[in-house]
Image: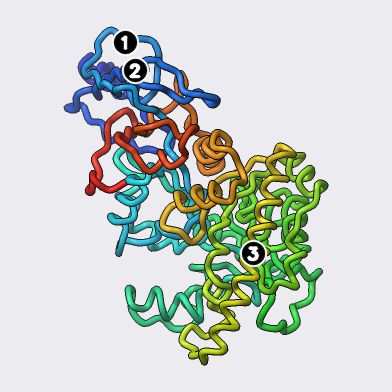
Amino acid sequence: MKYMPVFVLSVMIALSIHATPQGYASNSSSTETLPKVYAFTNGKWFDGRTFQDTIFYVKNGFLTKTRPPVVDETINLKGQFVLPPFGEAHTHNVEGPWNIDQTIQTYLRHGVFYVKNLNNIREFAEQIQNKINNPQSIDVAFAHAGITSSDGHPIRLYEEVLRLHRYEPIIGKKTPGWFNNRGYFVIDSRQDLDRTWPKIVAGKPDFLKIYIGQISPVAPHAHAPQARFHRGLYANLIAPIVRRAHKNGLRVSAHVETAADFRQAVQSGVNEIAHTPGWYIPTVEQASETILQKHDADLALQHNVTVVSTTVASLISPSEQHQSDADPHAHSSESQTDHHNTHAQHIQQAAEKIQRDNLQLLHQRGVKVAIGSDHAETSRAEALHLHNLEIFDNLTLLKLWCENTAATIFPHRKIGKLTEGYEANFIVLQGDPIQDFEQIRHITLRVKHGKPLFITDPHAH
């Protein structure tokens, strides 16, 4: 073995102690100086229960209460309130290069640092890797293509709606079927699973998304009427897929619509339920199928399953939620429109009651609830909607949004809390959000990996 020059060895040691949070690529070089050591004084820091007057220091991107030998800069927080950043546990917004800069800035402006995309196209995500998952941007986990049956959701959504009205105006003409193995994987049998699995893991997803809905034992589904819940995987394939995912070190998130879907997902060993039942109700008559019972919540608690809220998804009419079930360009008479609006209002009223009851039940039984919107600009819309529904008190809602949501997006990272050794990611609010939840709109400072962030529109809240 050759002797290593002292200079080279010293550089290697310096780089090795210049730690970066898990998931970040280090951009350090031998010519870079070490990052600034900050002291944040006169702040009220959230401890999970209340806000405490304390001083935190930041060294190498992590929080400490031990004063380092040298402090490069002191930032006076002037009595303002410090929170962990927010998360978005269900979205499809961060998907491609055509709007990524604006999307990143919107999330950062709203204080949302951690984002989970539950169904996306891998090749588009690969085009934005240099824009995300770094100390100056949002951190994103991708499922890539979801797994469903040959007549399951979201195939029609991709092929009949998104292909024509979302993607072709951006990426050009695509023939039907282009999204197969891109936007979704089809698995109808064990043979399909064996054949398709190498393609799934080759895409290196951060986790897997599976679709569960109106479960059929093994046979192909019969044609169903328009106003219905959506189809998903055949029941006998769900647990085998989950087992394979776990064997490959992948967590699994399940799309569900009914209480039966919820039960099937939990019993199959998934880690996360992507929707709280009640988020989508085709007709008022079918609303009762989305009501959870105590034994459902207890089962989820027993299996340590996290449930994502997505209540704002119900604010969009059923035909808009899943345009694959309707012609988005169909014209209606005035009477038809009035009837549709009245029907939508009745569905929304039923949905809000069920959402409130289901989420309260889950929380009361000790199930982890995370905040995700599915359709909204960011999870701020979801958090404000939950606040308006008066499902949780302000403290509980903050903890769900800051702590539980971060944990279900990046479960192996030290984020979601402001304590010794955790990543120095936080936001500063003008006022106390426990007393006034609207203060979450008034962010005066954003810090990521220990450094203040600067957004493109500092006057927008």
Image point (61%, 66%), residue name: 348
Residue of label 3:
349
Indicate left or right for 394 with 225 as reference. left
Point out the frontmost of discs 1 and 3: 3
Q: How is the image coloured?
A: rainbow
Q: Is residue 453 left or right of residue 119?
A: left
Q: Residues within 10 Å of mark 3 (few under 14, many from 20)?
A: few
Query: How far apart are the alpha carbons under marks 1 and 3?
Result: 56 Å
Q: Residues within 10 Å of mark 1 (few under 14, many from 20)?
A: some
* Badge nearest the viewer, 2 or 1: 2
- The residue lying toward the viewer, choosing from 254 and 26, is 254
Any part of residue 164 in sight: yes
In this rendering, is residue 80 above or below 405? Answer: above
Q: Are marks 2 and 1 in contact (CB under 8 Å)?
A: yes
Kind of element beneath mark 2: strand
- Outermost residue, left direction? 31
Check if mark 1's residue and mark 3's residue have beta carbons within 8 Å. Answer: no
Quadrant of res 54 = top left
Q: Position of residue 71 (x, y in %)?
A: 25, 14
Tell me which numbered mark, 1 or 3, is placed earlier along the sequence.
1
- Whichever of labels 2 and 1 marks the residue nearer the N terminus, that label is 2
Residue type highlighted by circle 2: Tyr
Name the side, left or right, on which 438 lies relative to 291.
left
Q: Is residue 349 left or right of residue 132?
A: right
| Residue 57: mark | 2
Residue 395: name its quadrant: top right
Q: Quadrant of the N terminus?
A: top left
| Residue with the mark numbered 1 | 68
